[in-house]
Amino acid sequence: MGLKNPKDRTSPQTIGATVGASIGDILIPRQDTLSNRVVSFIASHIFNSNVAPQLSDVRFFLWTRSNPNFGLQLLINQPDVLNRSTFNRLRPVKVLIHGFGGNGTTDRFVSKARDAYLLLGDFNVITVDWRSLAEYPNYARAALSTTPVGIYVAKFLDFLISQGTSSSLLHVIGYSLGAHVAGSVGNCLRLGRLPRITGLEPASGGYERIEKLRSLSSSDADFVDVIHTNAHVLGLGTTTPIGHADFYPNGGHWQYGCLWNTEYDSLIHCSHGRSTHYFIESILAGPTKFLSSRCPSYLKFNLGICGGCQDPLDRHNCVSMGEFANPTASGTYYLYTNPTSPYSIE
């Protein structure tokens, strides 16, 4: 389950060590082979090796029902800015973190999830904009920035807690590389503990083999739920269960409809991005949708060995994937989806 020692928490002093990884570390395994040397040589000429993160470029935007169409920028350690904003210390806080190539304002995942939450309830939705560190095509720089950015976001949430927000109201949701940022947020929070982190298709590039890249882990919050949609061969997401509850829709390798339905995503990113579509739909779909069966493998799920959620007798073995996941869930869960929206099968 990817468990780590909860006491092994990253300190700000580890930023330098984290960004000390090389471009070759990110893109290739450690074996000293001719092919790896070729890849390393090409990578060093394509990607900028200067990966020192400019954290002053990371911005935080607040969206509420009072300002659903324009974000108010909040600043760390500036209570006057917070007090003049629409932030309500008594309302739940949803923190959305984009992935590689995204942004904190117009990014599809961020904007659609934000709008869904504001329809669902009176939330404080905070979007983290780290676009300058996550720009194409420099994946290596973006990957090496996830831990420093996570530490910076944790400082911002510590500021909110110091101003009267209970840590119990916080829920951090990250997509792709943003899922690993979310993990570092939970790992580095000082004035409380995150009750929940949701990882949407955590990026695999480097994270399953490079120790210097810190992956999202079940130790980062009281409940970590993860949706895997593009793992294994040629996949962009992680394969191994890393949360308390890991969901593998359609087996987690590729998603139904992605060979022809590329309205929102390119063919190569369709299955990877489908994790965000499922989660966004789940926000307004309610707790009876995206029911998933706890099962040790997709093969056994396909064979019906673990039971089906349509049978009331098996409901004890089923939980909802997405926003309404049960915080007591644990293990690996499988489900089928429709190839087009609505994705949840009735």
Image (tube, helix red, strand yellow):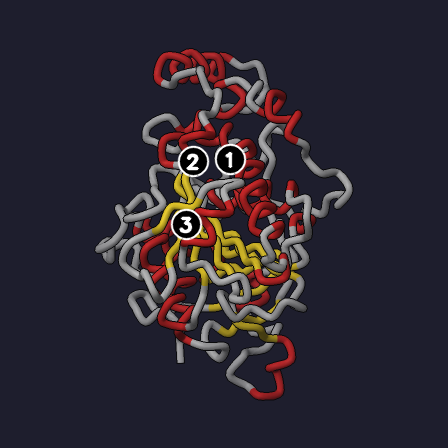
Residue at numbered disc 1: 149
| For marks 1 and 3 on the same chain, the one whose residue lies earlier in the sequence | 3
Q: Amino acid at mark 1?
A: Val
Mark 1 vs 2: CB contact within 8 A:
yes
- Place of residue 340 in the rendered image (x, y in percent of width and height, measured from the top left): 29, 66
Residue placed most toward the observer, 181 or 295: 181
Give the percent coordinates (x, y) of residue 19. Answer: 55, 22
Q: Position of residue 95 (x, y in %)?
A: 48, 53
Please tell me the numbered disc located at residue 58: 2
Residue type highlighted by circle 3: Thr
Q: Give the crowd class for mark 1: few <14, some 14-19, many >=20 residues within 10 Å.
A: many
| Residue at image point 34% right, 65% down | 66
Please name the amino acid that badge 2 sits on. Val
Q: Residues within 10 Å of mark 3 (few under 14, many from 20)?
A: many
Q: Which residue is mark 3?
A: 127
Where residue 290 sits: x, y (%)?
Answer: 46, 72
Instruction: Answer few, some or many: residues within 10 Å of disc 2's Cα (few below 14, many 20 plus, some between 14 and 19).
Output: some
Which badge, 2 or 3, comes first in the chain's sequence? 2
Q: Is residue 38 left or right of residue 187?
A: left
